[in-house]
Image (tube, grey):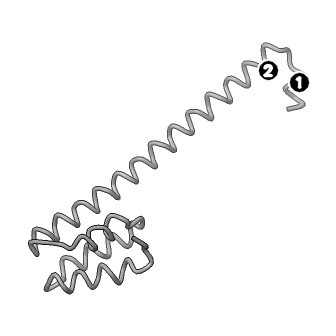
Amino acid sequence: MRALKQLPASQGELIMNTLAQEWLQEGRVEGRVEGRVEGAMTHGQEMLISFAEERFDILSQDAIGRIKMITSQEVLDNLTRKAWRSESLEELETWIKRLTAGINL
């Protein structure tokens, strides 16, 4: 900041405006990335729910709620693999409860 005070006023304003624009741009980029990650997570959750309902006809509201609360891509991927391998709805819902045990509904 001391260096800015030594510059003529017009140059100091120009530098501050440029910095502000750069910070805004960085914020926009971070926001887009976060939005994409969140969108991918939501899509993965919906796909898992659709797959489980297609395969087993129905999924409990508790299981749906737990899936929608997942915030880890690793947990979602693991649960999706378990859905493919599960022999029954009961087995899948047991996996859902195990893998989302720390989630409070």
Report whether 95 appears left or right of 87: right
Q: Amino acid at mark 2?
A: Gly
- From mark 1 to mark 2, how far is it between C-alphas? 7 Å
Instruction: Kindly state the secondary structure of the residue where label 2 is placed.
Output: helix
- Residue at the image position 31 percent from the left and 67 percent from the top: 65
Image position of 96 with respect to 38: above or below: below
- Give neighbour class at mark 2: few <14, some 14-19, many 20+ (Cα, 10 Å): some
Residue 67, quarter of picture: bottom left
Report whether 10 appears left or right of 49: right
What label sits on residue 12 in the rendered view? Answer: 2
- Look at the image and tell me in which quarter the N terminus lies: top right
Q: Amino acid at mark 1?
A: Lys
- Look at the image and tell me in which quarter the C terminus lies: bottom left
Report whether 16 appears left or right of 2: left
Give percent across and percent down for residue 28.
51, 37
Image position of 24 with respect to 50: above or below: above
Query: 101 or 78: which is nearer to us?
Result: 101
Instruction: Kindly state the secondary structure of the residue where label 1 is placed.
Output: helix
Answer whether labels 1 and 2 touch (C-beta < 8 Å): yes
Give percent across and percent down for residue 79.
29, 75
Give percent across and percent down for residue 69.
37, 65
Going from the N terminus, do you reach mark 1 or mark 2 first?
1
Image position of 61 with respect to 30: above or below: below
- Residue at the image position 32 percent from the left and 76 percent from the top: 78
Image position of 12 with respect to 64: above or below: above
Report whether 95 appears left or right of 70: left
- Residue at the image position 22 percent from the left and 81 percent from the top: 92
Give percent across and percent down for residue 85.
18, 82
Residue tagged 1: 5
- Residue at the image position 25 percent from the left and 76 percent from the top: 81
What label sits on residue 96 in the rendered view? Answer: none
